[in-house]
């Protein structure tokens, strides 16, 4: 069964390709490599023993997508491709709206032409409104997003809902990720950010290995137990397995459904630093600096619906996340660069 994976060379996409292959599916990857590296897919082959069909290109290129659908019998699309940095989206909102909304609409238009109606969307906890009680449930209020990145995810979810309303034969799952961290336990694939990391864990690992002088902690005056922001960190392998569970659900259901993919536990930035130091026996130097625009004080999931309906739950611990992140960084000091 062929699964088109947009953005499949990226961090979450590459780990998902591993789990898809393990589950007996055939991933077909399209990626423009704007924030990824084709070496990740070579490593996926090393891990699984299976070659990956890879097309380098932009998912907004409708003719290219049509060629893929023409040549390969696609059963389902998992849509990862998109710009993904909260702070950058505040600085470059038009880029985010143009890229993230445009890509989703082009993909759906080509899917309609080829009568493919199963779609898994890589959404985000950033769609939830400020002021919700924690933990966040799928029924918690959405909209009133704090940054353009979150708005693009919110709008894409709405586009997909409207497609399902117009054609109830569609089967759409919006997966709202919390904060993926970690790496494949082999150390062969992991998070490889371009330039200064936007996410916490690669910033920690790059500081620990000496690539950065110190970790910048954005804000120490939040209303949390230690003043730093609290997030629901989930191991990327658990997150990847959530997509396999979602495919199984899609094959026997129609309509649009939302699932949180998180652990249900919130950890602060300083909790993460402490856990990393404990798990790996290394010290991480950090400085406090001002808050980043668009960041919330606290955000963590209620993942019970995913357990009930998908049979999925996060199994890897905070220690696993920290150990696997460090293992990846030690084996690959420059990421995928030789």
Image: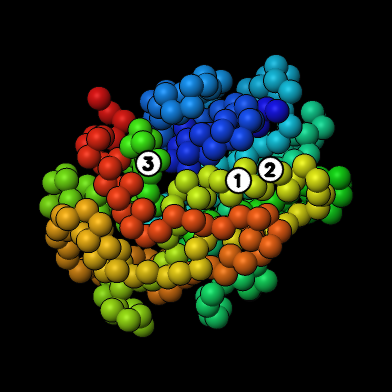
- Residue 26 as seen in the image, left or right of residue 317: right
Residue at (15, 55) in percent of width and height: 282
Q: CA distance from mark 3 to mark 2?
A: 24 Å
Residue at (17, 55) in percent of width and height: 281
Residue 181, percent from left and from top: 39, 52
Residue at (44, 55) in percent of width and height: 316
Residue 194 vs residue 302, the one in the foreground: 302
CB-based contact (under 8 Å), mark 2 and mark 1 = yes
Residue 221, percent from left and from top: 29, 79
Residue 270 vs residue 109, the one in the foreground: 270
**Residue that carries the numbered disc 2 in the rendered image:** 247
Up-down relation of residue 316 to residue 14 (above or below): below
Where disc 3 sits, the SS reads: loop
Q: CA distance from mark 2 to mark 1?
A: 6 Å
Q: Can you see residue 62?
A: no
- Looking at the figure, which quarter contains the C terminus? top left
Q: CA distance from mark 3 to mark 1?
A: 18 Å
**Residue that carries the numbered disc 3 in the rendered image:** 185
Residue 224, percent from left and from top: 35, 80
Where disc 1 sits, the SS reads: helix
Query: Can you tell which mark lies on residue 44?
Result: none
Residue at (51, 30) in percent of width and height: 31
- Looking at the figure, which quarter contains the N terminus? top right
- Residue 210 as seen in the image, left or right of residue 87: left
Residue 254 vs residue 109, the one in the foreground: 254
**Residue that carries the numbered disc 1 in the rendered image:** 243
- Residue 269 as seen in the image, left or right of residue 9: left
Disc 3 vs disc 1: which is toward the camera?
A: 3
């Amino acid at each position: 069964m062929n699964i088109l994976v947009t953005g499949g060379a990226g961090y979450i996409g590459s780990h998902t390709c591993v789990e898809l292959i393990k589950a007996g599916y055939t991933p077909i990857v399209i990626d423009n490599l704007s924030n990824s590296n084709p070496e990740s897919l070579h490593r996926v082959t090393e891990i699984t023993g299976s070659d990956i069909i890879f097309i380098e290109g932009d998912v907004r290129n409708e003719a290219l997508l049509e060629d893929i659908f023409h040549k390969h019998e696609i059963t389902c699309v998992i849509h990862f491709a998109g710009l993904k940095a909260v702070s950058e989206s505040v600085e470059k909102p038009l880029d985010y709206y143009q890229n993230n909304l445009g890509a989703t609409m082009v993909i759906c238009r080509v899917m309609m032409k080829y009568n493919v109606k199963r779609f898994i969307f890589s959404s985000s906890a950033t769609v939830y409104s400020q002021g919700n009680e924690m933990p966040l449930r799928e029924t918690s209020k959405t909209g009133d997003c704090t940054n353009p990145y979150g708005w693009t995810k919110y709008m894409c979810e709405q586009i997909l809902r409207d497609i399902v309303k117009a054609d109830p034969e569609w089967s759409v799952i919006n997966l709202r990720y919390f904060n993926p961290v970690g790496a494949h336990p082999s150390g062969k694939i992991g998070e490889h950010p371009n330039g200064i990391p936007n996410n916490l864990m690669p910033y920690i690992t790059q500081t620990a290995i000496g690539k950065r002088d110190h970790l910048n902690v954005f804000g120490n005056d939040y209303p949390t137990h230690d003043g730093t922001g609290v997030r629901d960190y989930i191991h990327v392998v658990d997150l990847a397995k959530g997509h396999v569970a979602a495919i199984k659900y899609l094959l026997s259901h129609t309509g649009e459904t939302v699932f949180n993919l998180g652990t249900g536990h919130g950890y602060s930035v300083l909790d993460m630093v402490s856990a990393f130091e404990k798990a790996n026996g290394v010290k991480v130097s950090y400085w406090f600096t001002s808050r980043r625009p668009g960041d919330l004080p606290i955000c963590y999931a209620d993942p019970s619906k995913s357990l009930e309906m998908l049979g999925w739950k996060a199994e890897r611990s905070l220690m696993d996340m920290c150990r696997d992140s460090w293992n990846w960084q030690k084996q690959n000091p420059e990421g995928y660069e030789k």
